[in-house]
Image: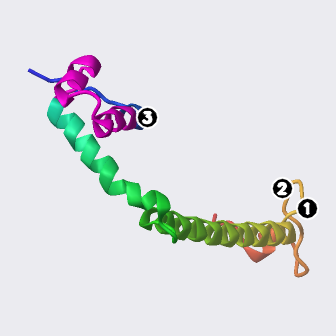
């Protein structure tokens, strides 16, 4: 027997929690109106009150710092891959004529440098 859980958007949770904070109606009334268990509404209310101070925080949040660190790591990786790609393009031009055909080496043909086993 599987139970399908309802998934609520952050906007919906904030709306219900704000109404609970206002206190114009009892949590049981809000529960019946929105089809959410009273304990869930109390939990959302608590979460909203705990995170309210973060909206006025001066510095970047932990999540923001983590995202900036990840972004910097990805920029470095893109730079590294770009350099490697450019290097591979240059070195492949040394051995090919641009159309993918092998060039002749100064000492002779590529076959002379790398004879095929018979």
The residue that label 1 is drawn on is 97
Q: How far apart are the alpha carbons under marks 1 and 3?
A: 60 Å
The residue stretch that appears in magenta: 13-37
Instruction: Please name which of the two marks, 1 or 3, marks the residue nearer to the observer.
Output: 3
The label on residue 11 is 3
Mark before the other along the chain sequence, 1 or 3: 3
How far across and down, in percent of the image, does residue 80 sit? 66, 72
Give yes or no for contact between labels 1 and 3 (Cβ–Cβ under 8 Å): no
How far across and down, in percent of the image, does residue 47 sit? 29, 49
Please identify the dominant SS of the magenta region: helix
User: Which one is nearer the viewer's eye here, 112 or 8?
Assistant: 8
Taking the spot 31% from the left edge, 30% from the top edge, the residue there is 7
User: Which one is nearer the viewer's eye here, 66 or 15?
Assistant: 15
Residue 80 seen in the figure: yes
The residue that label 2 is drawn on is 100
- Which class describes the residues within 10 Å of circle 2: few (<14), some (14-19), or many (20+)? few
Query: Is residue 45 located in the magenta-colored stretch of the structure?
Result: no
């Amino acid at each position: 027997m599987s139970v399908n859980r309802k998934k609520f958007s952050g906007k919906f949770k904030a709306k219900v929690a704000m109404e609970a904070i206002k206190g114009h109606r009892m949590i049981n009334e809000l529960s019946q109106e929105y089809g959410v268990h009273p304990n869930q509404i109390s939990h959302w209310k608590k979460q909203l009150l705990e995170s309210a101070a973060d909206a006025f925080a001066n510095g970047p949040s932990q999540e923001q710092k983590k995202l900036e660190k990840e972004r910097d790591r990805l920029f470095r990786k893109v730079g590294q891959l770009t350099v490697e790609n450019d290097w591979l393009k240059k070195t492949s031009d040394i051995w090919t004529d641009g159309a993918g055909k092998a060039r002749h080496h100064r000492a002779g043909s590529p076959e002379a440098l790398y004879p095929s086993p018979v």
